[in-house]
Image (tube, grey):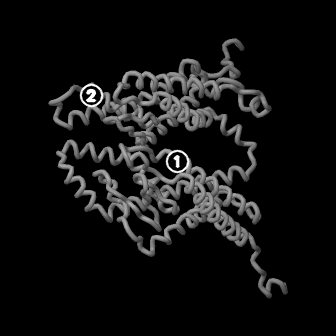
Amino acid sequence: MTALMPDRTRPSAGELRRDLRHRRPLVLLAPLAGAVAAAGTLVVCLALGVAGWFLTDAGTHGAPRDGLWVGALAWLMAHGSGVHVGGALVSVMPLGITVVCGWSVWRIGHRLGDSISGHGPDAQRIADGERDWTVPAAALLYAAGYVAVAVVTATLATTAATAPDISRVVLWSVLLCGLLGAPAIAIGSGRAAIWTATLPASVSATAAACRRVLSTWLLVSLVAFVVALVVDFDTALNVTSQLDTDTGATVQLVVICLLLVPNAVLFSGSYLLGPGFTVGTHTLVSPSVVTIGALPMFPLLAALPDTGPTPAWTAALVGVAPLVGAVGAMRAQRAHPTYRWEEGALHGCGGGMLAGAAFAALTLLAGGAVGPGRMTDVGPLVGSVLVHGVTAFGIGGLVGGLVATWWQRRRLEPVAESPEEEAS
């Protein structure tokens, strides 16, 4: 009779299915996931290219493969390839596409991590110090799949006239998978929680302050850009009308503008920090100096201030960065409270300085060449942005960390007893 009783020590069918769902073949799944992450955004760009080809003249001239070719080049440019147009290099990355590619790498990497989380040692053995190569192996294979799609795309889309740089495409593909894909795999597989459990609390608090300051600064920069564009929106409409485009071409122009909005946000942040940016050789746009020459007919450029003396109030814009640093540090310390003055100062100041360095790194991606002659130099002044960002966010974070510490200490102070309570 005992042989007919169910064995409670054996896993149920549902448990077996769940276990197998987290033990899918890593060697096959990781490169496939990387290829899907690359191909997903590539297909979207190809579709937009074909749509643009059709909108141009309803398909009267050329063939659909021309639209596919343009879409592939746009995808490659988002990976830093650059292209030659009429003999002139255009190296600016359309960061709108790059952001979407990064999101795809993160999301699919997270799902890959969940699918292979059952491989390797368990949490207890990892915590005991046993080496686990699951995430590194998956990350390498993930990057290999992504790079394979990138190389094939670059090979098929390259012509003698456009000459995109395939080596830069490979480099940026590896960076995307390393900076976003590998952490996503680690988080999805649960390894990140195990590895970070032993980190000092100050490291987590400083990272949280950096994240808060940087995200707040990007939001402020976006608002500043939108306000500047809305103020001169009539100029943008006038530029569009002078281009004498039909409806289809206007739609394409709007799409291009949207893809370059992240670039404009980084330009805006560089302006608010003080150093500003260039829109051609021997030009400068900053709160204190605006010197601009002739510009291409492009609607987003309507947000630029006019050449000449700047209003007195623009000098006060450099005070926005320390304020953002203080607010970001205070918000971060709500989730990581401390009651020691030195810790509050360290978390806020360290997080602010890291945010300044991170923003300067992002501005490296915003500029480049957009045409021949003087338009080969367009972009933020990265070195000055680094110095101003580290200083402004560091000082603001220091003040914000101290203020948050004061507030948290004040809330813990015991309420003074009344004379009646003392007498009793």
> In which quadrant of the rendered image does the C terminus lie?
bottom right
Residue 43 in the figure: left or right of residue 297: right
Q: Nearer the viewer, residue 392 or 351?
A: 392
The residue lying at 65 percent from left, 22 percent from top is 11
Percent position of residue 414, x then y: 76, 74
* Residue 19 higher or lower than 179, as above or below: above
Where does residue 132 sit, x and y in percent of width and height?
71, 27
- Residue 209, compared with residue 58, is above or below; it is below
Q: Earlier in the sequence, mark 1 or mark 2?
A: 2
Q: Which mark is residue 140?
A: none
Report which quarter residue 313 is drawn in: bottom left
Of 414 and 307, which appears nearest the observer?
Answer: 307
Q: Is residue 322 left or right of residue 349?
A: left
* 405 and 1: which is toward the camera: 405
Q: Which residue is labeled 2 in the image?
A: 66
Q: Residue at x 49, y 55 (%)?
A: 218
Quadrant in the picture for residue 255:
top left
- Left or right, residue 246 beside residue 285: left
Q: Which residue bears the numbered disc 1?
A: 362
Residue 416, percent from left and from top: 77, 80
- Residue count near mark 2 (Cα–Cα under 10 Å), binned few <14, some 14–19, many ≥20: some
Instruction: Residue at 17% x, 45% y: name it.
Output: 246
Question: Label 1 neighbourhood size at 10 Å, few (<14), some (14-19), many (20+)?
Answer: few
Q: Looking at the image, which residue sits at the far right?
A: 423
The type of residue carrying mark 1 is Leu
